[in-house]
Amino acid sequence: MKMPVAGGSETQVVPAVSYRGFAPAGKGVYFIRREDGGEYAIQFLNETTGNVREVQQLTKPLWYYLSVSPDEQYVLWTQADQSGSDVMIEEVAADKGYHKASTLELSDDLDMRTYIPEPKRDHDRNWEDKPAEQQRSVYNNRRRMKRAKGKRLGRLRSERVERTFAHICESGGARRTWLTKLENVTKRYLIAAAAHNLGRILFKLLGIGKPKALQGEGGSAESLAELMQSAVWRLVAPIIAVAAWLAGKLKFHRRWAIPVGTRGKALSSTGC
């Protein structure tokens, strides 16, 4: 969309843009468009004639944004030549603060299914000046959130993400600080997050992750000793199992033997 700086009505420039990729030029606009087959191409819109021509067909995965050199001799874009991992994000669950038509459209372009609750509005959405791709993405996300899977992922996100924020910011007191400078605040929050993660690890090992949790076990020295004994056993038990397995595999050779009837008198294994 475009409009005069002094104010006025909005005018649609191009029907759809992918990956936020557009760059104004002297006689028009360069933009990235996803074609029907799923491929991406850089196209140029001549504002004088209204014609659109294809500049370059993209053969590799595309990343964000597009730029044009000052002399308008080169078009610059980013692409992913190599990927460091075979893991792909297929589903995204987030809170309603991330619900935005352009964000949902971008997720669809990246082949990611979104599960984002839609905030309540006092009026219906107006799609007359919006691309059809954004409307389709919003409706698809709304339909997924009404399913049982969308509700389950929402509960799981609240349990894993929001509960962690509650432990660190509310119970841990990291929501506010008297420190100044971003570096010092970052260090303070990092320590709080590290302490929370350590508590999660201790919970896995001991069944109790924080000192206050001892109150639930009676808070006595005997309870603490039992917890420590349980933790030590959990650490030592795998070692004992491996040692027993090795003992069954290895053959031990003895130099001395005690024949039956000698009442414990040791004799040479050669009979001498």
Image: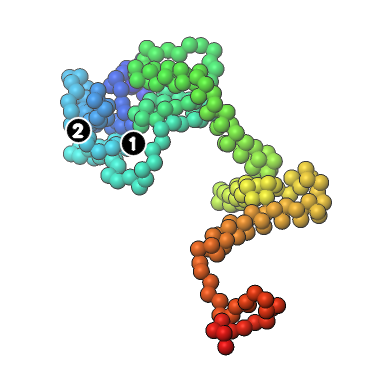
The residue lying at 52 percent from left, 21 percent from top is 148
Q: On the rendered structure, is 255 left or right of 264?
A: left
Instruction: From the image, tell me which residue sits under label 2.
Output: 57
Seen from the viewer's position, the closer of residues 177 and 156 is 156
Rendered position, 186 above or below 141: below
The residue lying at 57 percent from left, 85 percent from top is 271
Label 2 sits on what residue type? Gln
Seen from the viewer's position, the closer of residues 43 and 120 is 120
How far from the left and from the top, in percent, is residue 185? 60, 48
List the single residue furthest toward the front. Answer: 261
Where disc 1 sits, the SS reads strand
The residue lying at 67 percent from left, 76 percent from top is 261
How far from the left and from the top, in percent, is residue 149? 50, 24
Packing grade of label 2 (10 A; few <14, some 14-19, many >=20) is few
Rendered position, 40 above or below 225: above
How far from the left and from the top, in percent, is residue 210? 70, 48
Q: On the rendered structure, is 189 left or right of 138?
A: right
Label 1 sits on what residue type? Tyr
Specify which label sits upstream in the sequence, 2 or 1.
Answer: 2
Q: Tell me, for residue 64, which label it has, or none.
A: 1
